[in-house]
Image (spheres, grey):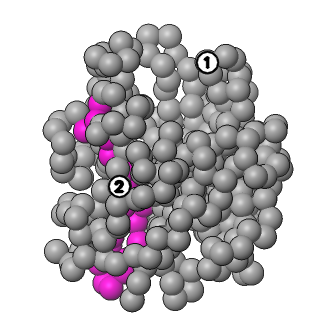
């Protein structure tokens, strides 16, 4: 195992209530995912607008930062991609989006949400492309590129993609079951992190095998894997929570986990080696979730959400050399 990393916590850097977001949204800036452009860093996130008294629709917007994440340069007032049409996999929301550059295009791997009856939701992974550095995206088609399959009969989501030696690598989550939550009284999902590869970014080979060991039991839920090579090793950050009672800011709420790999296939988990300090801010003291690691020139930053699944925005930590 590599020695522990060391980070400087920069605190919260984006609060949705301070900006004019799509459809007048003033809450939620979930799953910040960054791409480095010529003169700025563009951070995509999911914000929400209320659909009914109890449900929301999730839309993707972005905020532009300077290279040090100290100044906000611009914030989109329109979603970068409309929601899907009636009956499609992303009719009720898009959250998150992972963006990778492929030639002159940006590939945006989305998680589309659609409501169900027996359980609350189904999710699949879609692909949209941008020709204008992410200001807008267009779907390659109305359906997903990865959905439930014979060995993954429940949801798939949270696709994080990188290209290594011409091969697309995706770390994503797949559902292992739904079961009744004692606290909520409703069916709650369990999901694990897996790995897939592709020659074209559209057709994927996967084996439905978890790659990160559990820390809090077999019903541990793992989400939002993000990977970066540092010092010759591949470092993965993700978030994990308990199956039940996770919404209330309890011990079951999301925390950030960490694993390291030599080959992107076999991973050793050691959350203590992440080097992340215990948050003390009023916005992230009860929950830390949806991490995203990015290299900006010679510096490395980790973006993440706090309490209530990013309701109050996202923060940043900087890797210390």
What's drawn in magenta, residue-wise? 220-243
Figure check: 110 above or below 74: above
Badge 2 crowding class, 10 Å Cα cut-off, few under 14, some 14 to 19, many 20 or more, is many
Position of residue 209 measured from the top left corner of the image (x, y, whole percent): 24, 45
Position of residue 33 measured from the top left corner of the image (x, y, whole percent): 57, 59
Label drawn at residue 293: none
State the residue at coordinates (36%, 23%): 188
**Dividing the picture into quarters, in which one does residue 94 lie?**
top right
- Magenta span: chief secondary structure: strand
Q: Is residue 212 left or right of residue 94?
A: left
Tell me, yes or no, whether the highlighted magenta stretch contains residue 234: yes
Label drawn at residue 256: 2
Instruction: Residue 112: tell me if it is visible.
Output: yes
Figure check: 83 above or below 129: above
Q: What SS does tag 2 mark?
A: strand
Q: What SS does tag 1 mark?
A: loop
């Amino acid at each position: 195992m590599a020695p522990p990393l060391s980070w400087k916590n920069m605190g919260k850097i984006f609060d949705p209530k301070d900006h004019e977001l799509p459809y007048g949204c003033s809450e939620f800036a979930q799953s910040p995912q960054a791409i480095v452009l010529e003169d700025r860093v563009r951070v995509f996130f999911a914000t929400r607008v209320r659909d009914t008294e109890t449900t929301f629709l999730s839309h993707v917007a972005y905020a532009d930062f300077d290279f040090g994440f100290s100044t906000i340069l611009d914030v989109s007032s329109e979603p970068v991609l409309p929601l899907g049409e009636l009956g499609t996999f992303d009719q009720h929301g898009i959250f998150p989006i992972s963006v990778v550059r492929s030639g002159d295009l940006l590939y945006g791997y989305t998680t589309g949400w659609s409501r169900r009856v027996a359980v609350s939701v189904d999710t699949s992974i879609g692909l949209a492309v941008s020709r204008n550095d992410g200001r807008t995206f267009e779907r390659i088609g109305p359906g997903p590129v990865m959905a439930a399959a014979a060995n993954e009969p429940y949801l798939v989501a949270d696709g994080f993609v990188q290209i290594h030696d011409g091969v697309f690598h995706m770390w994503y989550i797949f559902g292992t079951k739904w079961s009744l939550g004692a606290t909520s009284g409703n069916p709650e999902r369990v999901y694990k992190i897996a790995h897939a590869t592709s020659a074209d970014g559209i057709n994927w080979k996967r084996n439905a095998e978890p790659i990160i060991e559990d820390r809090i039991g077999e019903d541990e839920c793992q989400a939002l894997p993000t990977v970066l090579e540092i010092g010759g090793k591949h470092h993965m950050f993700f978030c994990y929570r308990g199956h039940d009672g996770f919404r209330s800011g309890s011990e079951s709420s999301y925390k950030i986990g960490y694993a390291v790999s030599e080959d992107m296939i076999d991973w050793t988990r050691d959350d203590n080696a992440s080097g992340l300090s215990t948050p003390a801010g009023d916005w992230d003291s009860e929950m830390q979730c949806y991490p995203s690691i990015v290299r900006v020139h010679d510096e490395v930053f980790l973006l993440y959400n706090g309490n209530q699944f990013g309701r109050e925005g996202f923060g940043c930590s900087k890797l210390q050399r």
